[in-house]
Amino acid sequence: MIDKNLKGTHHRLLYYRNRYIEDEAVLRMVGDNEQTYMKKENERIYVPEEEVRRFSLDKHGQPIPYVDGHVTIISNYVYDYWGHFLSDSGVALYGHLKRYCYGDRDYCWPDLKLIGQKMNRSRNTLKKILGTLEKYGFVFMFYVQNADKNNMEESPLFKVRKKVPFLPQELYEQLPTELKLDHDRYMQQIVETFNQNLTLDTKLDYNEIYEDVLQKGKVVRKQKSTLELEKELQIKRKIYEKEASEQDRNIWAAVLKNLEHKLSKPSFDTWFRGTFCIKRNHTYVICTPNTFVKEWVQSRYNDLVYRTLRQHDPNFVELKYEALDGR
């Protein structure tokens, strides 16, 4: 009886490696023409099984000592099935984040730049990988500010899944056929081992789960700087002015000329300088630089504007006001 081989069977296995020797010139016919191309020539080296058994990579290099707590355990299920969706980089990043969740903690705040160097990935690439991990419910990131230091930004905090879930039915159906069969065998083994039936979740929408968390928070909109607001106003003004036709511009120029004669110079300059109009169907929209001007003109000069506009276009139906600052 032959002893079991390295794969655990009684077959006689041959172990070999291919080794490149040299390029060999090979002649071939392409149509009626002869062509010569270089083909890589290899030799096959068979190594006896006892030498394969004896060979050990652990005999080379200086091994690190085992230190309790310096080992990260990741279920094979992640590599075997979730890896199809997370990608190899996603599995690697999940492992890096999980290793920093010491003890029973399910959160960490590692240095992403350092992790990027360990994985040889750029910061932008890490962000994309994090997006994938969030999509499938393995990681959820919170940005962090220090309220005691004038809301100074600190490194983000990551909530990290420590218990690996089964694939939901929706993802299971997306597995390649061979991987799906392998998953079936795994599930059958689980059923037999734990003597219980298992049913995969139909679908998990983590966006809904994340939204439920965010619903418990408080919305605080970032205050824009004066420069940002001015830039937005300039862009919006250009868009609106582009919408105004030449006829709109001519009519409003005539209206402004009439108003300039009826109002004092300070009043005209304060409330009408910088305004313009757009005709949409049968409605004139008077665009003002900001909400304060809009409300003032609408409450105090609406009748005057309406009558003056009628002199130049008696067919419009409605008059509206819109502030470029959108407030």
Image (cartoon, rainbow, N blue to C red):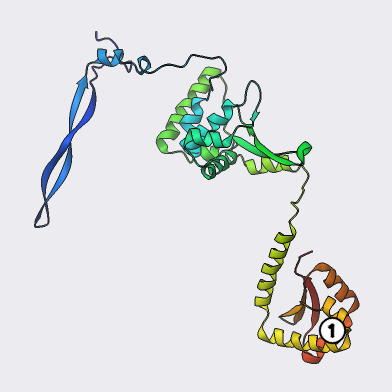
* Residue 223 shown left or right of residue 264 in the figure: left
Quarter occupied by residue 33: bottom left
Name the quadrant of the C terminus: bottom right
- For disc 1, the neighbor class at 10 Å (few under 14, some 14 to 19, many from 20) is some
Which of the two residues, 199 or 312, is positioned nearer the viewer here? Answer: 312
Name the quadrant of the N terminus: top left
Please provide percent x and percent y for residue 160. 62, 31
Name which residue type carries label 1: Tyr
Do we see residue 166 in this rendering? Answer: no
Do we see residue 137 in this rendering? Answer: yes
Q: Residue at x 42, y 39 (%)?
A: 176
Please provide percent x and percent y for residue 125. 51, 43
* Residue 225 drawn above or below residue 174: below
Which of the two residues, 290 or 174, is positioned nearer the viewer here? Answer: 290
Q: Residue at x 75, y 60 (%)?
A: 226
Please provide percent x and percent y for residue 264. 89, 84
Q: Secondary structure at mark 1?
A: helix
Please provide percent x and percent y for residue 111. 59, 34
Quarter occupied by residue 163: top right
Q: Residue furthest right?
A: 300
Quarter occupied by residue 44: top left
* Residue 206 shown left or right of residue 308 in the figure: left
Residue tagged by mark 1? 306
* Residue 311 shown left or right of residue 38 in the figure: right
Labels in figure, total:
1
Q: Residue at x 72, y 64 (%)?
A: 230
